[in-house]
Image (spheres, helix red, strand yellow):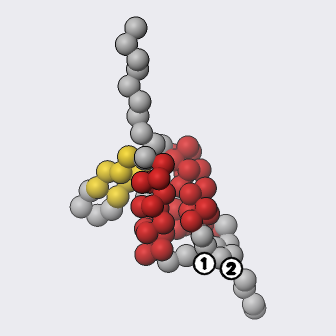
């Protein structure tokens, strides 16, 4: 059986992470990796981590670090004074 995998790029990581954050409120590299594998991409944790860090910096996403992994989510905006 010959299986063809889609080539991973930064745009695919950005779209997967955005989709997961919208659906779940946050994401991790493992969640992005699993999502992309389900979409037919060949993925490696190191590549996902590098690209997700770049995307988070470009998009000004919040990144929380715990002892095991980073959690990515959209920034929260405070309400304007009335």
Viewer-proximal residue among 51 and 6? 51
Label 1: state its secondary structure: loop
- Quarter occupied by residue 1: bottom right
Residue 18 image point, x, y percent: 56, 50
Q: Which residue is situated farthest in the left direction here?
A: 67
Viewer-proximal residue among 82 and 3? 82
Label 2: state its secondary structure: loop
Q: CA distance from mark 1 to mark 2?
A: 5 Å
Quadrant containing the C terminus is: top left
Q: Residues within 10 Å of mark 2 (few under 14, many from 20)?
A: few
Residue at 26%, 56% in the rendered image: 66
Q: Which residue is situated farthest in the front direction here?
A: 58
Q: Which residue is situated farthest in the top direction here?
A: 82
Residue at 33%, 62% in the rendered image: 69
**Residue 27, visible in the rendered structure:** no
Q: Residues within 10 Å of mark 1 (few under 14, many from 20)?
A: some
Write down the residue under mark 1: 42
Residue 8 image point, x, y percent: 61, 73
Residue 11 image point, x, y percent: 61, 62
**Residue 80, visible in the rendered structure:** yes
Residue 24 to residue 8: above or below: above
Please report whichever mark, 1 or 2, sits nearer to the chain's N-terminal start.
2
Residue 70 image point, x, y percent: 35, 58
Residue at 72%, 85% in the rendered image: 3
Residue 55 to residue 46: above or below: above
Q: Are marks 1 and 2 in contact (CB under 8 Å)?
A: yes
Residue 76 in the figure: left or right of residue 40? left
Write down the residue under mark 2: 5
């Amino acid at each position: 059986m010959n299986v063809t995998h889609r080539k991973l790029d930064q745009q695919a990581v950005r779209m997967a992470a955005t989709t997961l954050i919208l659906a779940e409120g946050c994401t991790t590299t493992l969640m992005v990796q699993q999502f992309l594998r389900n979409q037919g991409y060949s993925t490696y944790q190191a590549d996902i981590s590098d690209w997700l860090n770049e995307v988070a910096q470009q998009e000004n996403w919040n990144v929380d670090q715990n002892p095991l992994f980073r959690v990515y989510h959209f920034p929260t905006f405070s309400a304007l004074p009335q």
